[in-house]
């Protein structure tokens, strides 16, 4: 190639070609202002920037990419670009076409590993999301478990009642040994008491429905709810789960009572008169002195800590006491039935209908059985409705959690004020703007002012983790993902 130099050299230096790296002994900011030419004998061959040599501004280093001989000289200068008067029709390149093609293939082969690495990092970050959701579910289960523990603590107050029942059982055993059945009148639950139990159960179910309606209304406003309101909703939901468990237990007790085999009490008819005589004799006995028990009760009332524990969680305690009272009555009724069957001598008694109405109407009447069956069906229907609403609440809460996480796990690229390493957690104050690297006309990654986007109010309140980094010729970009607590 024939050319004429029409340039002004501001700075220049020459080296004998012995290596691929050469120091540029002056400061410069733009690598395109540095030019180089290879002198072979009496001919000078200008070199193309980016194809035959590169320049590192930070290190002040020029690197040759073309072939050279030890007899060649390298002339480096800073100034105007060469202008040619006469150009040949074919440009002679120091690189062969095959070598250039191999270089291009090497660059292309480097792209898939980089894509695989980025894809792997993205998958790793996405895989961290399900454990966080599992952690939230685990915390909810722990809260439910803590509530169950609280119920168990309140249940310790039943110890005194159990002791009282043991005393009654002991007294009944002693009475049965003496063929004294005078206490049978006080050991059965009358139809009125059973009706009262069922009415209390219906009232409790109605209150539970009202609580569910209030929870549904609160869930509708959950979108704008604060963290304190969400915690309050969790506590109410835990209380509802506790009531549901008690309802299941109560339903099982009723089913067991209905499945109890029919007990024919007609053989006891011959003993009725004798029992009445014994009852009158017991009524004539002097009353039991309850003064020691009253003294104990007053001592307990004077203990502040005991009162504070009994007053804690009034709503849960009221529900528990109702259920415990109902279950205790049912268990007492079953125990008495078994005791009567065990103690009665059916071989010696005549098979006659019981004439005493308060005993005959207890179990043998069809009306009482129909009444129990009707109310049991109502309880089962109410329980199914409560279970369906609880499932709806669980799905609503799950969808709410997923909607809150949606869109917040996206990986974004930004320009930072400071060069941070991978894994570093930063605040929004360290972010200049959202910007993705773009390729300029020279084939280098550079800033794209058109694609730069400022941080909105939501981004400024969040924290970000550096999960990737792209280093270009004119700067570096950091890939960030939001840190979700």
Image: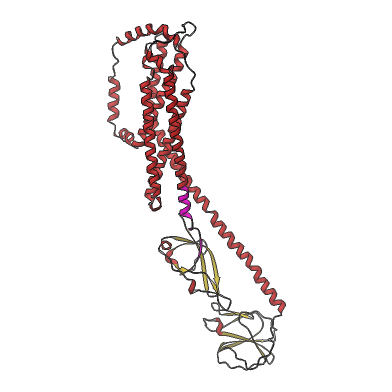
Residue sitting nearer the eye, 280 or 95: 280
Residue sitting nearer the eye, 201 or 41: 201
* Quarter of the image where one finds residue 63: bottom right
449 relative to 5, above or below: above
The colour mode here is secondary structure
* Quarter of the image where one finds residue 40: bottom right
- The location of residue 98, given as percent across then percent down, is 72, 77
* Quarter of the image where one finds residue 51: bottom right
- The location of residue 241, given as percent across then percent down, is 43, 38
- The location of residue 209, given as percent across then percent down, is 39, 38
Q: Identify the residue shown where x is 50% and y is 58%.
A: 409
- The location of residue 434, given as percent across then percent down, is 47, 68
Q: Does residue 402 belong to the magenta stretch?
A: yes
Label count reads 0
224 relative to 351, above or below: below
Q: Identify the residue shown where x is 62% and y is 92%.
A: 84
Horizontal side, residue 158 vs residue 21: left or right: left
- Magenta stretch in the rendered image: 397-414
408 relative to 186, above or below: below
**Quadrant location of the N terminus?**
bottom right
Horizontal side, residue 303 vs residue 89: left or right: left
**Quadrant location of the C terminus?**
bottom left
């Amino acid at each position: 190639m024939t050319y004429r130099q029409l340039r002004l050299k501001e700075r220049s230096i020459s080296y004998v070609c012995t290596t691929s790296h050469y120091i540029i002994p002056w400061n410069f900011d733009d690598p395109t202002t540095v030019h180089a030419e290879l002198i072979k004998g009496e001919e000078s061959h200008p070199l193309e920037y980016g194809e035959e040599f590169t320049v590192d501004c930070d290190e002040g280093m020029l690197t040759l990419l073309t072939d050279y001989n030890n007899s060649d000289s390298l002339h480096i200068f800073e100034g105007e670009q060469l202008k040619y008067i006469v150009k040949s029709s074919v440009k002679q390149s120091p690189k062969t076409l095959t070598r250039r093609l191999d270089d291009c293939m090497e660059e292309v082969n480097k792209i898939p590993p980089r894509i695989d690495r980025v894809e792997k990092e993205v998958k790793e970050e996405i895989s961290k999301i399900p454990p966080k959701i599992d952690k939230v579910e685990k915390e909810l289960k722990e809260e439910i478990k803590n509530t169950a523990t609280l119920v168990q603590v309140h249940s310790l107050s039943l110890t005194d009642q159990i002791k009282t029942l043991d005393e009654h059982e002991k007294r009944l055993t002693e009475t049965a040994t003496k063929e004294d059945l005078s206490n049978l009148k006080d050991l059965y639950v009358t139809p009125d008491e059973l009706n009262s139990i069922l009415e209390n159960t219906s009232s409790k179910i109605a209150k539970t429905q009202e609580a569910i309606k209030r929870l549904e209304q609160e869930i509708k406003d959950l979108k704008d709810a604060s963290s304190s309101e969400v915690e309050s909703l969790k506590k109410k939901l835990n209380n509802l789960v506790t009531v549901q468990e008690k309802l299941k237990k109560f339903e099982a007790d009723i089913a067991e009572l209905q499945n109890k085999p029919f007990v024919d009490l007609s053989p006891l008819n011959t003993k009725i008169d004798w029992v009445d005589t014994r009852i009158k004799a017991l009524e004539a006995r002097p009353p039991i002195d309850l003064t020691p028990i009253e003294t104990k009760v007053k001592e307990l009332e004077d203990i502040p800590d005991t009162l504070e524990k009994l007053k804690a969680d009034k709503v849960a305690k009221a529900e528990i006491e109702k259920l415990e009272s109902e279950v205790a009555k049912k268990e007492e009724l079953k125990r008495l039935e078994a005791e009567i069957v065990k103690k009665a001598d059916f071989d010696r008694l005549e098979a006659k209908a019981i004439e005493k109405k308060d005993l005959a109407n207890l179990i043998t009447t069809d009306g009482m059985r129909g009444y129990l069956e009707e109310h049991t069906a109502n309880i089962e229907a109410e329980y199914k409705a409560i279970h369906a609403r609880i499932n709806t609440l669980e799905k609503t809460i799950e969808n709410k959690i997923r909607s809150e996480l949606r869109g917040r796990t996206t990986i974004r690229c930004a320009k930072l004020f400071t060069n941070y390493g991978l894994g570093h957690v930063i605040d929004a104050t360290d972010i200049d703007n959202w910007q993705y690297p773009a390729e300029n006309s020279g084939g280098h990654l550079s800033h794209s002012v058109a694609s730069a986007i400022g941080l909105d109010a939501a981004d400024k309140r969040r924290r970000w983790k550096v999960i990737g980094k792209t280093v270009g010729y004119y700067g570096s970009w950091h890939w960030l993902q939001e840190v979700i607590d």
